[in-house]
Each structure stands twice: as C-alpha cells, then as structure tokens.
Image: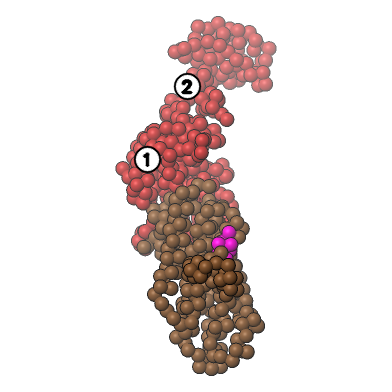
Amino acid sequence: MSGVIAVFKRELASYFATPIAYVFILIFLIVSAWFTFFYGGFYQAGQADLAAFFYWHPFLYLLLVPALSMRLWAEERKSGSIELLMTLPLETWQAVAGKYLAAWAFVGVAVALTFPVWITVNYLGEPDNGVIFAAYLGSILMAGGFMAVGACVSAATKNQVIAFIVSVVVCFVLLVPGLGVVQQVLTGIAPQWLVDGLTSLGPQEHFDYISKGVIDLRDIIYFALLIGVALYANTLVLELKKAD
Amino acid sequence: MIEVQGLTKEYGRFRAVDDLSFRVAPGEVLGFLGPNGAGKTTTMRIVAGFLPPTAGRVLVSGFDIETQAVEAKRRIGYLPEGAPSYPEMTPRSFLEFIADARGMSPAARRQRLDEVFQLLHLESVLHQNIDTLSKGYRRRVGLAQALLHDPEVLILDEPTDGLDPNQKHEVRELIGRIAKSKIIVISTHLLEEVEAVCNRAIIIARGKILADDTPRGLEARSRFHNAVSLKLSNPELIPDARNAIKLLPEVASTELDEKNGRITAFPAPGKLPLAPINALAERQRWPLSELHLESGRLDEVFRSITGGAAA
C-alpha cells in the first residue's frame, strides 16, 4: 500500500507543479457554469435542483478527462521515466493504481470546486440535497470510468495526441448508445433487447439513474467493473509493452 | 551475486542478446563494453527488471528478477540510460519520492537523503526544477536515486555520459570508494573509464560475449603489449635506427609513424625487447628524445575484437 501512496502523492503533486491543474480547473468551472446557465435553462426551469448542471457533465468529461489521462503513461514512455518507475520495487498494479487514483482525485477536486452552484441553488430555493449528493457521486463515478479508459489507452502509446484522440473516441462510443437521440434512431431499426443491452453497457444510463437520486447497487457495480476492467487492461498493456 | 544464465532477448526476428551467461561477485566492478547496438542497454534493462527476457534467467542475490521481482529490485540501484527523472520535480522532492517508493522509514530517509546530497554535491540545486538543471546535475540526480537505498547491486548505464572531465573524475572516484562491498555493473564506451574504475571487463557485440577479462588481461592481448616506442631528435638517423632494431632477435617487426617520427618495435613471441633496444641505443649513441614501454592499447584490442562484428 505504501507503494501506491508514494506514486499517488508524486503524481498529484505533479499536477500542481505545472499549469495543468490550474488550466483544467478553470476551464472545467467556466464551461460547466456556462452550459448550466446558458444552455441548461437553469433559471427558466424554475426548479430548485441541479439537473441542468449535471446533465452536461458526461459531455464535459468526454473531452476534459482524456485531456488529463493522455499524459498518464504516454509521458512516462516519452521521457523514459517509465524505466525508472518500473524498476522500483513496486508491483505494476501499484503504479497503475497510484497514478489512476491521483488523476481521479484531481478531477474530484475540480468537481468539488463547483460548490458555489450548490450554494446558489440552496440560496434560491429548497432543493433535495440528497439528490444533489447522489448526482455528485454519479458525476465522479462517470469521470472515474472515463479516466480508467483513458489511462489504459495512454499506456499503449508514447504519443499524447494519439492517446487523447483514441480515448475521446472510445469514451464517445461508450456514451453514444445512452443518448436519447440515438435511442430513438436505434429503436426504429434494431430489436428492443439489443437497444436495451447496448444502453446498459454504456455509462450514461447508470449515470442518469444515480443523478436522479436512485443509488442502486447495480449502477455502482457497473462503474466499479468499468474501472476495474480498464485498469486491469492497463496493467496488462504495461507488462506486455514496457520497452517501446 | 548476480547470476545471468543463458539470457536471450529477441525483438521480432532480431536477436539483441544472444545466450549470455556470466556471474558477478561482490567487490567486482564489471565494465560492459561494446559498440553501439551491441546489446549492452538491453542486457542491463533485463538485469534491472525492466524488460522480460525471451529466454534464460537472472538471479540477483538469489532472487529471480522475473518471479521474485520486488525482492530482487529492492537490492538493485539502477541508473537507466540517459538518467530519466521527472522534469517538473525538484531533486529533493524526486529523491523523497524514490525513498517513499522504496519504503524507507522517515529516519532512514532523512539520513540517506543528506548523505547522497553531500556525496553528489547536490545541495545547491535541491530546490530547482530538474528540467532547469544542467546535464551534469541531472546525471548526478540519477546517480543519487540509484544510491539512495545503499543497494547491494548497482547497475549504471553510462554513468558519466554528458559529464565534463572534472565530473567524470568525481563519479569514478565515487564508484571506486563504494566498490569494495558492492556489485557494480557499468556500461560505457569510454575505454579510459574501464581502466579507471573496473576490475573486470566484458566485451559484447551482436549480443554475444567476445571477451571476459581484467582490463590488464585485455591490454595483454594487444599487439602493442610490451612493444617499445622511441623517438630520435635527429630525423636523419631514423632509417638506420629502424633497420638496426629490426635485426634484434627480440623484435618481430617495426613500424614507423611518418607523422611524428615515432618508431614502434613489436616483440617476438615471449620476448621483452625493451632492454636490448635500450642497450643498442646507448651503443650507437642515438639522440633519444623518447623511449617507453607500451602496456597495450585497450582501444586497439576493442577494435580488433569487435571489428568483425561492428554493424
């Protein structure tokens, strides 16, 4: 465990040692607020909830999480520091977990810094804070799922741009079947069981349930599995191609 | 003890390391020599546990680098080629991370950090980002990282590459000082480095061991070993002197360096031509400006051993 903590601490500190952290947090806050108030119809809806705020999170993460995850392993490969990391007395999974948790925790910090939105809605009305709490949980799980996918992709290349593009595409493919528009199209051309199956493979449906305040174990398990499988694949990819 | 048994590494159809076997005992400083692309770095990466071998195995203090990787890696200090580190960190935070990842206790960490800072003269740059440091300092940060846990085994891939002559000298002194109780494997293509720090040298090319000897033993393979070089201050005497030397029974052949007028006499097998040449020169009253015994030239041995193999 001390190995995971050492990697976690180093990794998290490195975000704040470079402009990455500040740029990411700033953009996340600005864009999420902008979507909420201008496109989400936060005021027009006239309801004291944060549905308009959380609705946009999957789309934000689609671009912003790969922007963070792309450097996780590709940068280590490029600079050669992966050789250093992999010859320390750590198991590969410890390095994978430490780096992943740091990146996830960092997104967690960015999400937590959206608290003024929560204060605003409590000032304006009397929202169901339980639902808001659940939605925050769903949002962070969603980011965690994308981050794990992105980490795995990043482990396969030394080129951060490739890591970014491939991660966005993979996350998009995961996200697409859960979108309302796509479902309408699919329902017309595919049998219902296929549509349902595809939908529950993607994170959107599970995110929707959780963010409505329904914390079902199945949805939590879905995200745990998504993260677990992606990180396991991440470890395998590293073991298989450490050198190039 | 490092034991390397039948080590082979293939990249596709290319065989980078071909059935290498050797052992290194405590107190040995092994220089790994070879032309570029000979398989030095690949071998070191396998021994350090970064790359898995295609066949064969490596035991570090009895621990298999593949199946008991963590135990083996605890005993190794490794400086990868190019001394990579994390550019956005300071030497202090970087070395603290290494200490934590190696599971050092807070007390041991504090003590060892101070020791390696002093040993490698890093005090003045501890709070500067690594990417702002000169190549020499970065290399020393890499060395500090390898030495931090006072390992039994040190594997250093080109430890003095990019250092100026003073820094090279310092690093070699340092290796000499810590060598007694440790196993040290360094790769280099600087032959003077082998003479300066190693007590054993392995020459590899195309992934195979071509020579495994002490630096002295390698020098003895040189055709210059026990040869005698001399220079005369009067160049007109050179042709006669050369002929006279050639007639000595201890001399097999002579060569003349046209550029600087130096005559080199190569010994007949098992003979030592220095004394007879010296006596001859006194008899003939040659105005000698230089007369010396060659111990053998490592670069020449290196070229003749690897010559056929240089890709």
Mark 1 = which residue?
A: B58
Kindly indicate the quadrant of the structure image that contains residue A96. Answer: bottom left
Q: Nearer the viewer, residue B136 or B4?
A: B4
Kindly indicate the quadrant of the structure image that contains residue B110. Answer: bottom left
Q: What range is drawn magenta here?
A: A166-172
Q: Dot 2 falls on which chain?
A: B
Mark 2 = which residue?
A: B221
Element class at badge 1:
strand
Colouring chosen for the image of the structure: by chain
Q: Magenta stretch mostly in which secondary structure? A: helix
Residue A173 point in image, percent of width and height: 56, 64
The kind of residue tagged 1 is: Val
The kind of residue tagged 2 is: Arg
Judged left or right of residue A57, residue B55 is left
Residue B171 point in image, percent of width and height: 49, 44
Residue extending furthest left? B62
Q: Nearer the viewer, residue B257 or A228?
A: A228
Q: Please determine whether, in this image, residue B246 is positioned above or below residue B56.
A: above
Task: Point out the frontmost of discs 2 and 1.
Answer: 1
Distance from Cα at disc 2 to Cα at disc 1: 30 Å
Q: How many marks?
A: 2
